[in-house]
Image (cartoon, rainbow, N blue to C red):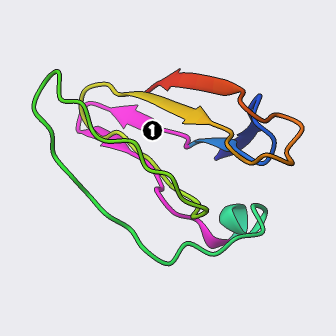
Amino acid sequence: MRILDTEIEGAKLICPKVFSDTRGRFFECFHQKAYSLLETVFVQDNFSVSQKNTLRGMHFSHQKKLVGVFLGKVFDVIVDLRKNSPTYKKWQGFIG
Protein backbone atom coordinates (compact mmCIF):
# COMPACT_ATOMS: atom_id res chain seq x y z
CA MET A 1 0.00 0.00 0.00
CA ARG A 2 1.35 3.41 -0.94
CA ILE A 3 0.21 6.60 0.80
CA LEU A 4 0.89 9.69 -1.31
CA ASP A 5 0.65 13.40 -0.52
CA THR A 6 -1.72 15.50 -2.62
CA GLU A 7 -1.65 19.20 -3.48
CA ILE A 8 -4.06 19.81 -0.57
CA GLU A 9 -2.32 19.98 2.79
CA GLY A 10 -3.29 16.99 4.91
CA ALA A 11 -5.13 15.09 2.15
CA LYS A 12 -3.62 11.75 1.13
CA LEU A 13 -4.05 9.40 -1.80
CA ILE A 14 -4.01 5.76 -0.73
CA CYS A 15 -3.01 3.29 -3.44
CA PRO A 16 -3.39 -0.38 -2.53
CA LYS A 17 -1.26 -3.03 -4.19
CA VAL A 18 -3.52 -5.08 -6.46
CA PHE A 19 -2.56 -8.70 -7.14
CA SER A 20 -4.06 -10.20 -10.31
CA ASP A 21 -4.03 -13.68 -11.78
CA THR A 22 -6.36 -15.92 -13.79
CA ARG A 23 -8.74 -16.24 -10.83
CA GLY A 24 -9.29 -12.48 -10.49
CA ARG A 25 -7.87 -9.76 -8.25
CA PHE A 26 -7.02 -9.32 -4.60
CA PHE A 27 -6.05 -6.29 -2.52
CA GLU A 28 -6.02 -5.23 1.11
CA CYS A 29 -8.55 -2.45 1.62
CA PHE A 30 -7.42 -1.95 5.21
CA HIS A 31 -4.08 -2.59 6.89
CA GLN A 32 -3.76 -1.27 10.45
CA LYS A 33 -0.02 -0.59 10.30
CA ALA A 34 -0.26 1.35 7.03
CA TYR A 35 -3.30 3.35 8.14
CA SER A 36 -1.67 4.19 11.47
CA LEU A 37 0.79 6.32 9.46
CA LEU A 38 -2.13 8.66 8.68
CA GLU A 39 -2.44 9.54 12.37
CA THR A 40 -6.22 9.26 12.24
CA VAL A 41 -8.86 6.71 13.18
CA PHE A 42 -11.62 5.82 10.75
CA VAL A 43 -14.86 5.32 12.66
CA GLN A 44 -17.27 4.61 9.82
CA ASP A 45 -17.17 2.71 6.53
CA ASN A 46 -19.99 3.15 4.00
CA PHE A 47 -20.59 1.46 0.66
CA SER A 48 -22.83 2.70 -2.15
CA VAL A 49 -23.62 1.56 -5.68
CA SER A 50 -24.35 4.17 -8.34
CA GLN A 51 -25.57 4.00 -11.89
CA LYS A 52 -23.40 5.40 -14.70
CA ASN A 53 -23.27 9.24 -14.83
CA THR A 54 -24.56 9.64 -11.26
CA LEU A 55 -23.57 12.83 -9.45
CA ARG A 56 -23.26 12.48 -5.70
CA GLY A 57 -23.60 15.54 -3.47
CA MET A 58 -20.99 17.79 -1.98
CA HIS A 59 -20.14 17.21 1.65
CA PHE A 60 -18.81 20.04 3.81
CA SER A 61 -17.43 18.67 7.02
CA HIS A 62 -14.33 18.34 9.12
CA GLN A 63 -14.55 14.57 8.97
CA LYS A 64 -11.93 12.61 7.14
CA LYS A 65 -13.31 10.63 4.20
CA LEU A 66 -12.13 7.39 2.69
CA VAL A 67 -13.31 6.91 -0.90
CA GLY A 68 -12.77 3.69 -2.85
CA VAL A 69 -13.84 2.36 -6.23
CA PHE A 70 -14.42 -1.35 -6.73
CA LEU A 71 -15.91 -1.41 -10.22
CA GLY A 72 -15.94 1.31 -12.86
CA LYS A 73 -14.52 4.79 -12.38
CA VAL A 74 -15.16 7.84 -10.25
CA PHE A 75 -14.08 11.46 -10.55
CA ASP A 76 -13.58 12.66 -6.99
CA VAL A 77 -12.76 16.29 -6.14
CA ILE A 78 -11.42 17.71 -2.90
CA VAL A 79 -11.51 21.42 -2.08
CA ASP A 80 -9.71 22.97 0.88
CA LEU A 81 -12.21 25.24 2.65
CA ARG A 82 -10.14 25.73 5.79
CA LYS A 83 -9.60 29.52 5.92
CA ASN A 84 -6.33 29.27 7.85
CA SER A 85 -4.86 26.60 5.58
CA PRO A 86 -1.94 27.36 3.24
CA THR A 87 -3.88 25.53 0.50
CA TYR A 88 -7.18 27.40 1.13
CA LYS A 89 -9.45 27.38 -1.95
CA LYS A 90 -7.16 24.96 -3.76
CA TRP A 91 -8.82 21.93 -5.34
CA GLN A 92 -7.65 18.68 -6.83
CA GLY A 93 -9.50 16.00 -8.77
CA PHE A 94 -8.78 12.30 -9.02
CA ILE A 95 -10.03 9.60 -11.36
CA GLY A 96 -10.07 6.19 -9.78
Camera-side residue: 81 or 9? 81
Residue 26 on the magenta span = yes
Answer above or below: position of 32 versus 84: below
Q: For mark 1, what is the residue?
A: 19
Q: Residue at x 55, y 23 (%)?
A: 93
Magenta segment: 16-32
Q: Residue furthest front?
A: 83
* Position of residue 53 measured from the top left corner of the image (x, y, whole percent): 17, 21
* Position of residue 74 measured from the top left corner of the image (x, y, whole percent): 35, 28
Q: Residue at x 57, y 64 (%)?
A: 63
Which image quadrant for residue 6? top right
Residue 29 on the magenta span = yes
Answer above or below: position of 22 versus 39: above
Marker count (numbered): 1
Which image quadrant for residue 73? top left
In this picture, residue 69 sits left or right of residue 76 = left
Q: Amino acid at mark 1?
A: Phe
Q: Residue at x 68, y 39 (%)?
A: 80
In this picture, residue 93 sits left or right of residue 68 = right
Camera-side residue: 9 or 79? 79
In this picture, residue 25 sits left or right of residue 91 = left
Q: Residue at x 34, y 32 (%)?
A: 21
Answer above or below: position of 33 versus 50: below
Q: Residue furthest left?
A: 51
Camera-side residue: 47 or 83? 83
* Position of residue 30 measured from the top left corner of the image (x, y, whole percent): 51, 63
* Position of residue 51 measured from the top left corner of the image (x, y, whole percent): 10, 32
Asked which secondary structure carries label 1, the reply is strand
